[in-house]
Amino acid sequence: MKYLFLALAIISEVVGSSFLNASNQFTKLIPSAITVVAYLLCFYFLSIALKSIPLGTAYAIWGGLGIVLTAIISVVVFKNKLDIGAIIGISLIVAGVVVLNVFSKSTSH
């Protein structure tokens, strides 16, 4: 259940970030409202996940997956391009999350 709340936090963060881009610097009401609600939900779900997942672990997963999913949406929806530096950087972040979860003893209570 703890990872369900973390997944909901990640999804909410990605929705918030996507609509933040669509809000055109908060000049469009609907995308702006969706951004605010999505970020509120994101931090609410993250706070629930933090009851049973250590902060460092939860934040690494939240940030890492959020970056990957947001990058995918930026390419697919907003037609942004990722250069080799961006791809390498995102890959290193994913590798860091994997190393943290597989090899670190700090991921358990």
Image (cartoon, rainbow, N blue to C red):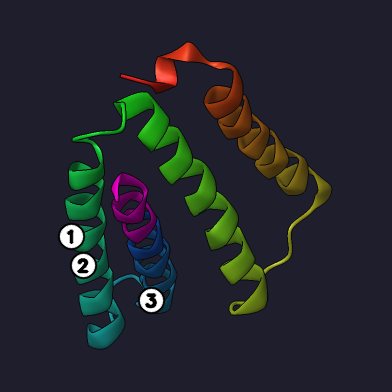
Q: In this orientation, which residue lies closer to the viewer: 31 or 70?
A: 70
Q: Quadrant of residue 40?
A: bottom left
Q: Which residue is mark 1?
A: 40
On the image, the x and y values in percent for residue 38 come to 26, 67
Amino acid on which disc 2 is placed: Val
Q: CA distance from mark 2 to mark 3?
A: 14 Å
Marks 2/1 in contact by CB < 8 Å: the verdict is yes
Q: In this orientation, which residue lies closer to the viewer: 43 or 102?
A: 102
Label 1, secondary structure: give it: helix
Label 3, secondary structure: give it: loop
Q: Which residues are magenta?
A: 1-9
Number of the label disc, if any, that sits on residue 36: 2
Amino acid on which disc 1 is placed: Leu
Q: Is residue 28 visible?
A: no
Amino acid on which disc 3 is placed: Asn
Q: Residues within 10 Å of mark 1 (few under 14, many from 20)?
A: some
* Mark 2 or 3, closer to the camera: 2
Examine the rendered structure and indicate whether residue 37 appears above or below residue 46. Answer: below
Q: Which of the marked residues, 2 or 3, is nearer the chain's N terminus?
A: 3
Name the residue at 25% across, 86% down. 30
Q: Is residue 109 visible?
A: yes
Label 2, secondary structure: give it: helix
Q: Is residue 2 magenta?
A: yes
Residue sitting farthest toward the right? 84
Examine the rendered structure and indicate whether residue 32 appears above or below residue 65. Answer: below
Number of the label disc, if any, that sits on residue 24: 3
* Mark 3 or 1, closer to the camera: 1
Q: Residues within 10 Å of mark 2 (few under 14, many from 20)?
A: some
Name the residue at 59% across, 53% down. 68
In the rendered picture of this protein, how many numbered marks are placed on residues?
A: 3
